[in-house]
Image: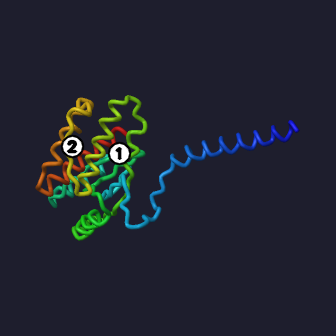
Amino acid sequence: MKKKELDILGVLLGIIIGAFLGFFVSTRFIKEDVPVMGGEKEVGFIYLVEVSQYDNPTGANNMIKELSLKDIYAITIEKDNYYYVYAGVYGTNEEATALKDTLINYGFNSKVSKEYILDYTNTIIDEKEKEFYDYCISCYLLNLNGGTYDISYDTVDFETNIELFQDISMLGNLKKETLINKTRLQIYSLLRKIK
């Protein structure tokens, strides 16, 4: 009789531990290519117009100079020992594709890459700092998707990163498309530094 009770307890304990571990392991993976059901919009993704990729900063700087001759603003982002040149960041693939096509017409072989940014703050330990960056990312995503936001000075400590705070504050009030694009790229560059 005691042997059956022990087997049931072991099975129940195994199920509970398995469900607990399965939940936490499954939340660590992001499935980017999962089809969106019912027309719902994916949340937390941005679309970057990548002009080129180099294994040294000199090549990236030369590309930025070449783009500036065509009045195209671009930035360099270092990721995994490569230097990526980006000319735009958008909330939808359609907007990014329009800039990519324009760049191709100018002779720049470009592509659109998709990036998830809601996990940028996962490594931040300080709660106030994490809250600040989460707030900035939320405002950034709202702007990229055509939304508006009001800066809430009481809820977040903006002294964490004054430059990012200034760019986020300014972004919501800009009307000129070239300034919006420059500011969005600058914000992306600042957010990449926390990842």
Residue 158 at x, y = what percent? 23, 32
Point out the frontmost of discs 2 and 1: 2
Residue type for callout 2 = Ile
Please tell me whether residue 8 is drawn above or below residue 154 in the rendered image: below
Residue at 81% across, 41% down: 7
Residue 144: x and y, percent?
A: 25, 54
Residue at the spot of label 2: 168
Q: Residue at x 41, y 30 (%)?
A: 125
Q: Quadrant of the N terminus?
A: top right
On the image, the x and y values in percent for residue 190 come to 28, 41
Q: Which mark is residue 33?
A: none
Q: Could you tell me if residue 51 is visible in this image? A: no
Give the camera-side residue of 161 and 23.
23
SS of the residue under disc 1: strand
Q: Quadrant of residue 161?
A: top left
- Which amino acid lies under the numbered mark 1 shown in the image of this protein? Glu
**What SS does tag 2 mark?**
helix
Badge 1 crowding class, 10 Å Cα cut-off, few under 14, some 14 to 19, many 20 or more, is: some
Tell me the quadrant of the picture where the C terminus can be found.
Answer: top left
Mark before the other along the chain sequence, 2 or 1: 1
The residue lying toward the viewer, choosing from 194 and 41, is: 41
Can the viewer see residue 121 in this picture? yes
Mark carried by residue 78: 1
- Residue 11 in the image: x percent, y percent? 75, 44
Side of 138 relative to 170 (left or right): right
All told, the count of numbered labels is 2
Q: Most extreme residue toward the left, as rendered?
A: 176
